[in-house]
Amino acid sequence: MYNYKTLSGTDLSTIHQAFVKAFSDYQVKMDLPFWKFENMIKRRGFIPELSVGAFDNENLIAFVLNGVRIWDDKLTAYDLGTGVIPEYRKQGITTEILGKVKNLFKEKNIERYLLEVLQNNTGAVELYKKQGFLTTRSFDCCYLKKEDFSFPVCKDIKNLEFFNTNQWEEVKNLWDYNPSWQNSIDSINVFPDSFSYSVVIDENKIIGYGIADKLTGDVPQIAVSKEHRNKGIAKSILSDLFNNTKADKLSLINIDQRDDNFKNFLVSTGFVNFASQYEMIMSL
């Protein structure tokens, strides 16, 4: 009834229009003008040739957008957006697309398929479980408005234009848990100059840092070394990130729910939780 094909020949503006329609009634409000959509999917590694759409005549009515990278030392595909325009739902279209996607992956020797899904989107969670996805992690998503934060920069913050390879290796030692796909080093390095980098250095070592999108306020990474926590470093970093973004709020997406210390810090600082997600992986 519908035509299924890869998105290699589909204009990005067409995909954007379908994306906006498909997520028009999403549980989390999606503010995605074209420039922000383009930035998002490029950061997450969008590959049109490995993404599939369903078409009603020439109209794109459903899609699965995918990227591929080495993830935990395995060639892994990432679902960076699955959606069906509301009037075409409950016809099995997503299941049909996922079947075609898996065939594409097998041809490319891709070993795993990774995605994130809202925990309260029970229909989608059950669909992915039936497809063979297993839950690997649970995430929280939160934000803090600039007007609700008044902590001054009380630590010596150094601002960098980007992180070089050695600096990335250094800050990885500060992590308690690995970032999610969209917050990973690979994702940041797609557009490294779109971020501000706030760093605290002690004895020539980075003991704390934060990274924020200069326009949107998205914070993909922030961390402080264990021995330097509870000293105001993280709050100083947040202050500096606020000073270096045009956004009126900072957003942290996919905070690992196992990280109790960081979650307690966010609550005490005034961050508001607006969603929770599962990270799910399927072996191919």
Image (tube, rainbow, N blue to C red):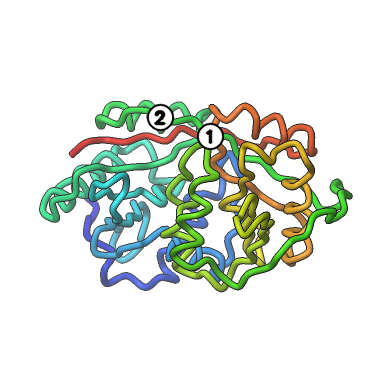
Above or below for 278 versus 250: above
What element does badge 1 sit on?
Answer: strand
Q: Amino acid at mark 1?
A: Asp
Nearer to us of marks 1 and 2 is 1
Q: What SS does tag 2 mark?
A: helix
Q: Residue at x 47, y 50 (%)?
A: 22
Name the kind of residue labelled 2 in the image: Val
Where 272 falls versus 161 (above or below)? Answer: above
From the viewer's side, name the closer residue of 6 and 276: 276
Q: Residue at x 34, y 30 (%)?
A: 127
Horizontal and vertical percent position of residue 253: 58, 45
Could you tell me how far apart the alpha carbons at marks 1 and 2 are, in whole angstroms?
18 Å
Query: Which residue is located at x 72 percent, y 34 percent?
Result: 265
Q: Position of residue 132 (x, y in %)?
A: 25, 30
What residue lies at 55% left-to-right and 45% top-to-bottom? 174
Q: Is residue 25 left or right of residue 268?
A: left
Report the front residue among 50 and 100: 50
The answer to whether one can see residue 212 in this image is yes
Q: In this picture, is 178 found above or below 171? A: above
Tell which of 92 and 262 is nearer to you.
262
Which residue is nearer to you in this view: 216 or 263?
A: 263
Decide: is 256 above or below 4: above
Q: Earlier in the sequence, mark 1 or mark 2?
A: 2
User: In this view, which residue lies farthest toward the front?
Assistant: 203
| Mark 2 lies on residue | 125
Q: Which residue is mark 1?
A: 256
